[in-house]
Image (cartoon, rainbow, N blue to C red):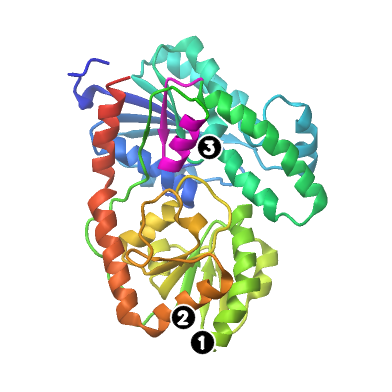
Amino acid sequence: MPASKPALSVKVLLLANKVPYPPFDGSSLAIRSMVEAYRLNEVAVRLLVLNTNKHHRDPATVRRNTPPGVEIDLLPVRTRPTALGALLNLANPLPYHVSRFYKPILKRALRSLLKAETFDYIQLEGLAMAPYAAYIRRYSQAPVLLRAHNIEHHIWERHQAHEKNFLRRLYLQLENTRLRRYEKKQLQAMDGLLFIAAPDRDWFRAQGGKQPAAVFPCGTDASAPKQTPSAPSYDITYLASLDWLPNQQGMQWFMDQVWPRLQTLRPGTTMALAGQRMPEHLRRWQSSLFHVLGAVKDGPGFIQEGLLTVVPLLAGSGMRVKLIENLAIGQPMVVTPQAAEGLPLQNGEHLLIEQEPEAFARATVQLLKQPAEASVLGQTGQSWVLRHYQHAQIGKRLLDFLQKL
């Protein structure tokens, strides 16, 4: 694309496996963040999105929440993983994480759309969309980009390390080997790579990857401080997609290792856990001190119902989009190092970062007992995010990168 081409004439097609409007978890927030970065720089955005049975969104609700300048085609599919499907997939050249999202309905939609319209760039949101790259090139000359939300096999390697069931651990080992090979090959086959986090880009370079690549983190559209409730309902809040295994694993660690220590250090501490698709087995934690709420309508509002927020993640890659959301509203946080990966956050300046259960519990109690310190932490984190992570700023840098491809 000529360097002088105005942004207004740029058309981008995005393929995704989660609906970004309205967002409902970290992945959908990440997709929304990218769409907003383009939209706020006057780029025309078209999305082909798998509306999966697991994360199904009502089309009317999506239309009401989609902003001007964005077109979304929802493609209903079934992608729910099963034990039998995972086992049979060992004979498939595609890893199970990817094959579940390779659907004829999206191939047909692509063929029809690319025959009718021309796009300047076609962007794949995450590794699950990578199999469509070869198909896209049959019908379009546009550069094909992959936006790596994370390094997928890193997540599952870490999950495997904490898996106690022998058979599941064995399967994860086999699947991770296939996923690692596939991921490396696909990243090196793209015309350009957009990484959410610098460590992921650095890993790619260390593997010998030569493709044009840059880091574009998820952003926020927050422009003014939110008002903290005058009387928070809980001491601690945590909002997560708890049908995702790493989040379940992190919460199990928190409840086994941190929660008892919290009650010893500060008896009567209260906490609320929320998230869509809450597994029933997690509701066993419900008590007079620990509240399991399930889905909430206002995520930021719920977060601020706590004096502070914890993010006890043990496995991950990329960046935690909800950390940006929490920082943007000035919420004090205590998180694990894995949760803070991908963000240049300073421990003790923007939030508190602790790995060991005893230290995590003590840091949490420290902020609960010293609300002035917690408030300063929240304000500092908020100022930092609003300086560096606005959607429009990220989108401008992204367009400069694309013009050089």
Residue 325 sits in which quadrant?
bottom left
Q: Describe residue 380's horizontal placement relative to residue 82 as left or right.
A: left
Residue tagged 1? 266
Magenta run includes residue 172: no
Q: CA distance from mark 3 to mark 1?
A: 43 Å
Residue 152 on image: x %, y %: 57, 39
The amino acid at mark 3 is: Asn
Q: Please report whichever mark, 3 or 2, sits nearer to the chain's N-terminal start.
A: 3
Mark 1 and mark 2 in contact (Cβ < 8 Å)? Answer: yes
Residue tagged 3? 17
The amino acid at mark 1 is: Arg
Residue at point 33% right, 63% down? 350
Q: Describe residue 34's horizontal placement relative to residue 53 as left or right.
A: left
Q: Please report whichever mark, 2 or 1, sits nearer to the chain's N-terminal start.
A: 1
Residue tagged 2? 365
Q: CA distance from mark 3 to mark 2?
A: 39 Å
Q: Please report whichever mark, 3 or 1, sits nearer to the chain's N-terminal start.
A: 3
